[in-house]
Image (cartoon, rainbow, N blue to C red):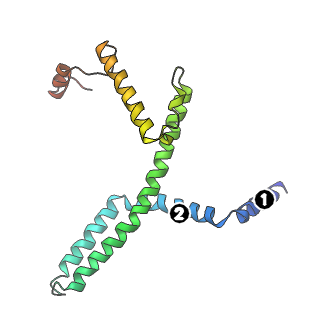
């Protein structure tokens, strides 16, 4: 009985969602799946195959304007649509990365919590913060307190195969 009630509640919630939420969710799922498929080696091989077939049909169509228009139109349409798919996927990935970094900042003792949500700052504030970090880095280098720094002699030795990184 409880299972039936729960299913009824879920169905009512889904019905009450507005059209924009449904379309947004559908696009999110479509964009994620498309990026996985279209970013594969098989998709690249398919694109190469299409170009080769198009090129080989050139003599049959006497390299006409229509023959050229087919590939130009096709690539334009695909490029136009891919921009939106790529942007959606990158926005979601960036948001996930920001949330993960925000959680790390919150969890670290001594971390500056004001660094959470930096992506919401203005360009001027970000530039100011960047300059502040540059000053901190230079001060650490002068004081010899930069454990991540690699000396130039160490770089040369590592490049020559003397040490693994």
State the image quarter where residue 146 is shown: top left
Residue closest to the eye, 72 or 141: 141
Q: Residue at x 33, y 62 (%)?
A: 42
How busy is the neighbourhood of tag 1: few (under 14 within 10 Å), some, or many (20 plus)? few
Quadrant location, the C terminus: top left
Residue closest to the eye, 127 or 111: 127
Residue position marked by numbered label 2 in the rendering: 27
Which badge, 1 or 2, comes first in the chain's sequence? 1
In the rendered image, is residue 3 in sight? yes
Q: Position of residue 73 (x, y in %)?
A: 31, 77
Secondary structure beneath label 2: helix
- Asked if residue 139 is positioned above or below residue 127 in the image, the reply reads above
Q: Position of residue 111 (x, y in %)?
A: 51, 24
- Asked if residue 131 is positioned above or below residue 2 in the image, the reply reads above
- Asked if residue 26 is positioned above or below residue 92 in the image, the reply reads below
Residue position marked by numbered label 1 in the rendering: 9
Give me the C-alpha separation between circle 1 and circle 2.
24 Å
Residue closest to the eye, 65 or 1: 65
Q: Residue at x 24, y 85 (%)?
A: 66
Quadrant location, the N terminus: bottom right
Secondary structure beneath label 1: helix
Q: Which mark is residue 130?
A: none
Q: Position of residue 151 (x, y in %)?
A: 22, 19
């Amino acid at each position: 009985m409880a299972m039936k009630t729960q299913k009824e509640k879920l169905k009512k919630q889904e019905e009450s969602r507005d059209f924009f939420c449904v379309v947004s969710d559908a696009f999110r799922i479509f964009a994620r799946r498309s990026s996985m498929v279209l970013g594969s080696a098989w998709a690249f091989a398919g694109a190469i195959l299409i170009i080769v077939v198009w090129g080989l049909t050139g003599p049959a169509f006497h390299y006409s304007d229509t023959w050229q228009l087919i590939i130009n139109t096709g690539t334009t349409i695909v490029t136009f649509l891919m921009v939106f798919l790529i942007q959606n996927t990158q926005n979601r990935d960036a948001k996930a990365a920001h949330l993960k970094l925000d959680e790390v900042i919150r969890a670290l003792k001594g971390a500056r919590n004001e660094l959470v949500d930096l992506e919401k700052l203005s360009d001027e504030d970000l530039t100011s913060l960047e300059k502040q970090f540059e000053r901190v880095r230079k001060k650490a280098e002068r004081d010899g307190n930069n454990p991540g720094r690699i000396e130039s002699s160490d770089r040369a030795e590592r490049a020559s195969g003397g040490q693994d990184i």
